[in-house]
Image: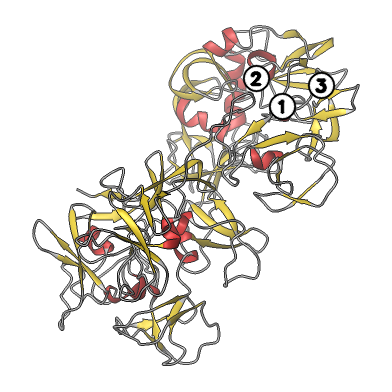
Amino acid sequence: MSFKIKGHPHRVSLVKNHDGLECDACDQSYGDAYSCGECKFTVHKKCTFLFEVVPEIFEHPSHVGHCLKLLTTGAPDHTVPKCHLCGKNTKRLLYHCRDCKLNVDIDCIIDPMCAQADLNMPWHHHPLFMGNFATNMTCDVCYDNHVDGYICLCCRLFVGWVCAALVIDSPEITHPCHTKHPLKLLTEGAPTYTDPKCHLCGEDTGKFIYHCDICKFNLDLVCAKTKTPPVALSNLKVHEHTLNLMPRLISFVCDACGTKGDRAPYVCHQCDFMVHKKCAHLPRVINVNHHDHRVSFKYPLGLGEWRCGVCFEEIDWSCGAYSCSLCPQYAIHSLCATRKDVWNGKELDGVPEEVEDIEPFKRNDDNTITHFAHEHNLMSLSKDGEESSLCGACVLPIGSYTFYKCSKSNCSFILHEKCANISKKKRHFLSSEPLILCFESIIDDDFLCRACYQMFCEGFFYSSKGVNFDLICSSITMPFIHGSHDHHLLYVKQEEGNKKTCHNCDNERAKVLLGCIKCNYFLDFRCATMPLTIMLPRYDDHPLTLCYGEEKASGKYWCDICERETNPETWFYTCNDCGVTLHTFCVLGDIRNAKAGGSFRHHGELELLPNNRSTRPLCNNCHSRCPGSFIMKSYDGGEVYCSCYCVSSQLGYTYKGADTCPPWAIYELELIVVIHVNYLSTYILHYLTARK
């Protein structure tokens, strides 16, 4: 993320660095800094107040009568790059008098100004200025922006009026977590001889802390004033006795979660039980989205070889964990079970468990059922004649599988037997709330799977609070085994500042992925769920097999559908008998569950039509012949499009995420963006932003 600071011509970025950072304004250490990549300019975040508060000085004690102006580019060429007061070499940030060709460094400017400060406060050892500074300043107490407050130019310290009155009202306190000695307020951070973090919560203390120099004890303002930890905890879910706070630095292994701690545990001396503060409040009974039954906290877990049902790492049986009473071998780490993406935050201890009807149909007799998704009875059949019919749930051909068909002769509704048994409600790692099976979109415009970010047109899908997932993504179980990698893959959520990229398509915009953390190998859901084999009778009579790329390919590969070059190092489909190669986009398109005659909303009402004419139509956007099995036609104007990408482009929409398009269009459009040749056009709806 880049910022614009007043007085500097370029945008700068924030650099997190507490030690060894050379500032172009001072010789001190004030923590984080702004850095400019273009001119290599670095300035402490605390020193930037000079840009705002004192960009010009008209009556400085060292130079009366002329204006001293702040420069950020160093001493002008026509002057000696030294401070004319102290003789030291000047830095990039200095004050300059154009009339006298005088250079003054920051320290020589600040020191006389500090002497003019006349406000003494009990909580700081330097005199302060007080007033309205006409610009937002970051308070060193609450870290919010204020314009009114106190400032110390020597220490680069700013405190808003509210914090000065309410938070740091006393320079010395007696705290219940440290009753032996009073704690004194320090305004320049923790002393170097102590741990710089709060001894209770472990957070960075910043400039303002309460300190005991006898015990070397540090307390941040949050723990001292607003969220003081209780000295004892009773009526807990994880232990039957009262736990007492041990407010000191001590290394221990938490008995509740099995991870290490280094300060302020809660202990039961009677049982030799020791836990983190956060683990003391763990729930007793919960539901998790990785398991169908409730799980309960148990300490100790008990002798055995246990593996976590979420991260699949080993569990220390001597510590606490969550286990299932109905599945004796199932257990989860305490921290994994209570993650926000695993647990919905509801404590179920004492809440009776409801028996829900999750069966999708009721059996009338040996041959007929009544399915919740259809108004008529369905008959169980296995005879030939329906191989090419499409299942109403997965929108795939019935083939040779056993199926259920509507008993009415004028109704063509049909389901695979396996699809008819799909549960009406289930728990899945994609949502902390249960997923509900649906067959009509809850939100008319949202035909988008929030895992793979592909549009889906027909069939069943799962939904939770308006967030939809197609059947393929919601059928994935953990651990996930994929042929492209030797190890199992786990569910991974993207984190800000640590973006992970899909190994196949280089997509870094996916919010969720499947990955192997140890190998740094990740797949987005679109790539992970590509079918291993597929039939495409229009182009080949044999099954097409997904190939995971060839590192040492000889010669060029060409797609037999769009007749463009194929990158052999990325995934493609091939026929083992004929040797043809096909782009994954050309084979799969960018709509799931496509069905001739189907319709959906995507910037307007669109109809899906089979692309089976002798002459393929021209796409209104990319002006190429539509190569896919389906085309999209607008109900309003009759325009024809070959993909959702082309629909978006034609209507003036663009992606916030990766810039992609069908491989056959890259030679027809003058695109300014870099295009991954076989990257399936995802992010159709969620990441679109209107230009108009």
Give 596 or 494, whichever is nearer the viewer: 596
Task: Identify the element where label 3 is drawn.
Answer: loop
Q: CA distance from mark 1 to mark 2?
A: 9 Å
Q: CA distance from mark 2 to mark 3?
A: 15 Å
Q: Which residue is mark 3?
A: 247
Task: Identify the element where label 2 is drawn.
Answer: helix
Residue at (48, 74) in percent of width and height: 532
- Considering only vertical position in the picture, is 465 above or below 589? above
Which mark is in front, 2 or 3?
Answer: 3
Q: CA distance from mark 3 to mark 1?
A: 10 Å
Q: Which residue is mark 1?
A: 201
Q: Is residue 684 visible to the viewer in this orientation of the structure? A: no
Nearer the N terminus, badge 3 or badge 1? 1
Residue at (58, 31) in percent of width and height: 353
- Considering only vertical position in the picture, is 221 above or below 415? above
Q: Position of residue 38 (x, y in %)?
A: 48, 53
Give 160 or 268, whichever is nearer the viewer: 268
Nearer the N terminus, badge 2 or badge 3? 2
Question: Given the image, on which type of amino acid does mark 3 rest?
Answer: Pro
